[in-house]
Image (cartoon, helix red, strand yellow):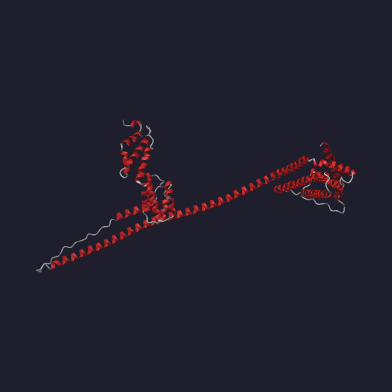
Amino acid sequence: MAEFEVNTGVNEDSNEEQLSADKQPQAAESTADDLPTPSQEPRKTHRVRKLTEKGQELHDEQIKKATYRFSVSYEKWKAIIKDAQKAIDGQCSKDLLQEHVAEVTNAVNNVNVAYVELRRIESPDNDTRRRMDTCEAVTRKFTDAAECCPSQAKVDSLRYEQIWKETDSVFKSTASDKTSVKSHYSKLSSHSKVSSRHSSRHSAKTQDAAAEVAANEATLQVLLEQENHIKEIERQEAEIAQKQRELEAKRREVERLETVKKLNAAKARQQVYERSECSDAEIYSLLHHSSDQEKEVKPKNNDSPTKMCFSPQVVIPPQELNATDLVKTFAEILNASRLPVPEPTVFSGNPLRYSDWKISFQTLIDRRSIPAEEKIYYLRKYVGGAAKKAIESYFLLGSKSAYNAAWTVLEERYGDPFIIAKAFRDKLAAWPKVNSKSSVELQEFADFLCSCRAAMSQIKGLQVLDDCNENRKMLAELPDWLEVE
C-alpha cells in the first residue's frame, strides 16, 4: 500500500508539473495580450455580476449536480478499468480485449463530458483536475498495454508489468477519492454557506426595509380611513344636530299654533258673547218699548165694556260677559308657553320606575297626534340600558305595529305586577342594615317602606310583606336601639 501511495504521489506531482508548465506559456500569452498598445483603446471596466440569494442557491445546486455526475462517471470508469485489467491478466482473447478497450474509451468519454460540464459552470478545483488527468493517463497506458498483448513476447511482458505497476495506485485509492470528494463537497458547502449567509443578511435588511415600508403604508392607509370615517361621523352628527334643531323648531311652531288656536277660540267665544249681549239688549229695548205703547193704549180703552186680557210677558235679562275670565285664560296660555317644555325621564330597565315613566311618556308624547315614526323616535330617545336592548329590533321598522309591539315587550318585562312585586322584595331583601348614628339612612328605609305600603293596594303580590316573618326581616334592618324585644 505504501508503494502504491508513493507512486500515486509521483504521478500526481508529475501531472501537476506538466499542467503548470502548460499554464505558464498561456499566462505569458495572456499577459502579453493584456498589455495595451498605442493603437489599442483602453479596456472598458465591467461590473461584477452579483447573484441574488435564489440565484446563488440555484448556482450551488448546479455545481453539486455536475460534481456528482463527474464522481459517478469517474467511479464507473474505475470499475471498468479494473475489469479490463483482470481480463488482460487472465490472457483473454483479442476480441474480448477490443470490447474492454471500447468500454474503457466510452467511460473516459463520459468522464470527459462530465468534466467539461462542470468546468462550464465553475472552474474545477485541484482534486478534480488531478482525477481527470489521472483518468486520461491511465486510459492511455491501458490502450498501450492492450496494443502490446502479453502473448507476443517476454520483452513485451516486462513492458506490460511496468505499465500496470504505474497504474496500480489508481485502483487502490478509492478511500482517498471518496475523501477528496467529501472535501470538495465540504468546500462547496462552506462556500455556499458563506454566500448564503451574506445573501441572507442582505435579504434580511431588504426584508426589514420592505416590512417597514409596508407597515408605514398600512398605517397611512388606516389613518386615511380613520380620517374619512371621522369626517363622515362629523357630517352625520351635523346632519343629526340640524335635524334636531329643525325638529325642535317644528315642535315650538306646533306649540305656538296650539296657543294661537286657543287664543282664536277665546276670541271667537268673546265675539259670540258680544253678539249675544247685543241681541239681548235689543230684545230688552224692544220689549220695554212695546210695554210703553201698551200703557199708552190702555187708558183710552177704559170706557169700552170689554176689557182686554194680556198674558204675562217673560223678560230675559241680558247675560253679562265676565271679561276678567277671558283675561285670566289668556294670561294662563301665555304663561304656559313661557314655561320649559316638560319631557319624560329615561327608563333604563328598573321595574320600580316603569309605572312613573310610562305615565309621563303617555301624557307628554303618546297622546299627541303625531306620526308613529316620530313616536318611535321619542321612545328610542327616552329608553336606555337593558330596556333599549329588548326593543331595539323594532326601531328599524318604524311602523305603528312595531311601536305597539315594543310597548307590549316593555309591559311583559317591566310592567307585570309579579315582576314589580319581585323588584320591591329584592330591594327590601338587599337593603343594608341601618346605621345606628345615621338618621338619613333610617329616613330612606322608612320612605321605601311607605312606598311598599302604597303599592300594596295595586299589587297583590306585595301583601306577603304583612307576614310576621317578613316583618322580622324588616326589623332586623333597624338599628339596635329601635329593635323590639
Image quarter in which the N terminus is found? top right
| Residue plotted at (61% across, 49% down) | 217
Question: In this orientation, which residue lies closer to the viewer: 135 or 125?
Answer: 135
Q: Position of residue 358 (x, y in %)?
A: 37, 49
Q: Image height check: is 73 above or below 473?
A: below
Q: Say which quarter of the image contains residue 81.
A: top right
Residue at the (35%, 46%) spot, across then down: 416
- Residue 412 visible in the current orientation: yes
Determine the residue located farthest toward the left in the rendered image.
Answer: 305
Which percent across, then down, holds residue 28?
87, 47
Q: Position of residue 224 (x, y in %)?
A: 58, 51
The quadrant the C terminus occupies is: top left
Looking at this view, is 181 or 345 the one in front? Answer: 181
From the viewer's perspective, tell me whether residue 55 is left or right of residue 17: left
Residue drawn at point x = 35 percent, y = 44 percent: 418
* Image side of residue 65 versus residue 388, left or right: right
- Note whether residue 339 is visible: no
Image spot of residue 459 (x, y percent)? 32, 44
Q: Quadrant of residue 374?
A: bottom left
Residue visible at 34% across and 39% down in the picture: 449
Q: Nearer the viewer, residue 468 or 308?
A: 468
